[in-house]
Image: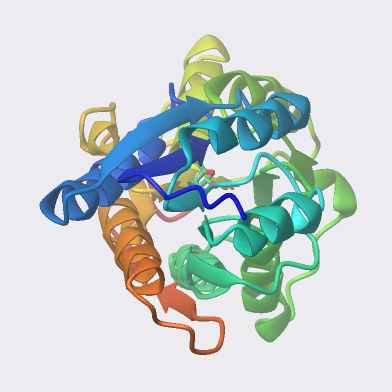
Amino acid sequence: GLRLDKTNMIGMIIPDVTNPFFPAVVRGAEDVAFANGYRLILCNTDNDHSKEIVHLNELRTFLPSGLIVIPSNFSDLTAQAESYRKSGTAVVCVDRLPKGWDGDTVTADNEKGAYEATSYVLRQGHRQLAMVMGPRHLTNAQDRLAGFKRALHEKKIPIGPEYIQEASFDQHGGYAKTMLLLRMIPRPTVIFAANDMIAFGALLAFREAGLHCPEDISLIGFDNLQFAEMTSPPLSSVSQPGFQMGTSAAQILIDRVRGDDGPAKHLVLETALKIRDSVAPPS
Ligand code: RIB
């Protein structure tokens, strides 16, 4: 029969090329791919699942050896992944997991990272907390919410559902939902932003509302982007190893291409709390 050889291409699908977290993952993946003789084809979905399906279908024409996918949402990608696997193309999912995914994964410990950030603001004396979580259908957003709630629960601190706002993982979502939270009575004394882009939007909202951070309201983010240390005040944030997520995903993929057919790998990377100046005890 007809046998199509794989090329030295690795397809990589990311949800938002404008968010600096994802280029960090791409750099990691590209480093390892390049060093091993592979080249990357990069596709951006703008968090649009229909675009993702088009990319998944069309990447096939490049006969890639493997795919690294950061899913746009919680849609089932099993059908696409199965058909790649059948033709011998390995698939690794990174950061967010699609529904029912049973293949290799590389994620951060989102629950623990959020738990540690929340425990830290509680230790600073905050009792009126709010969270701007990411999109509810994303597994990493769900895990960060779970960590936030676990820390509150542990200290028996109640929280009304209106203090947990869903937003897209970007500055627009962060701005809009922070504006809404600032009108609530009582006003939250601290906002946990589920990623730094949301936190940047929150800082803009604070400024427009005439509030100073951290004197009037505290803020903590997630991702620890390079820009986090350049905001005013410098943003405290949970760092997750984006670059390493990329290197690990590419390494797993290349191992698969070279014949590793062991059980699915689920690599969970550690997060670390980076304390800067955006959290102070409530006034
Ligand atoms: O900044 C983008 C966010 O969405 C990150 O926190 C990452 O985990 C991604 O899925």
Identify the residue shown where x is 73% and y is 49%.
80
Most distant residue in the left direction? 35
The mark total stands at 0
Q: Nearer the viewer, residue 63 or 118?
A: 63
Q: Is residue 59 left or right of residue 220?
A: right
Query: Looking at the picture, how far across and down is residue 151, in whole percent?
Result: 62, 76
Seen in the picture, residue 21 relative to 4 is either above or below; the reply is above
Seen in the picture, residue 138 relative to 101 is either above or below; the reply is above
Most distant residue in the top direction? 208
Identify the residue shown where x is 53% and y is 69%.
105
Most distant residue in the front direction? 1
- The quarter of the picture where residue 147 lies is bottom right
Seen in the picture, residue 272 relative to 35 is either above or below; the reply is below
Query: Looking at the picture, how far across and down is residue 115, in whole percent?
Result: 54, 72
For the N terminus, give its image quadrant.
Answer: bottom right
Whether residue 126 is visible: yes
Q: Is residue 249 left or right of residue 76?
A: left
Whether residue 235 is visible: no
- The quarter of the picture where residue 150 lies is bottom right
Identify the residue shown where x is 56% and y is 19%.
205
Query: Looking at the picture, how far across and down is residue 224, in whole percent?
Result: 32, 47
Identify the residue shown where x is 66% and y is 82%.
155
Query: Looking at the picture, how far across and down is residue 23, in whole percent?
Result: 33, 35
Q: Nearer the viewer, residue 147 or 105?
A: 105
Q: Is residue 280 left or right of residue 32?
A: right
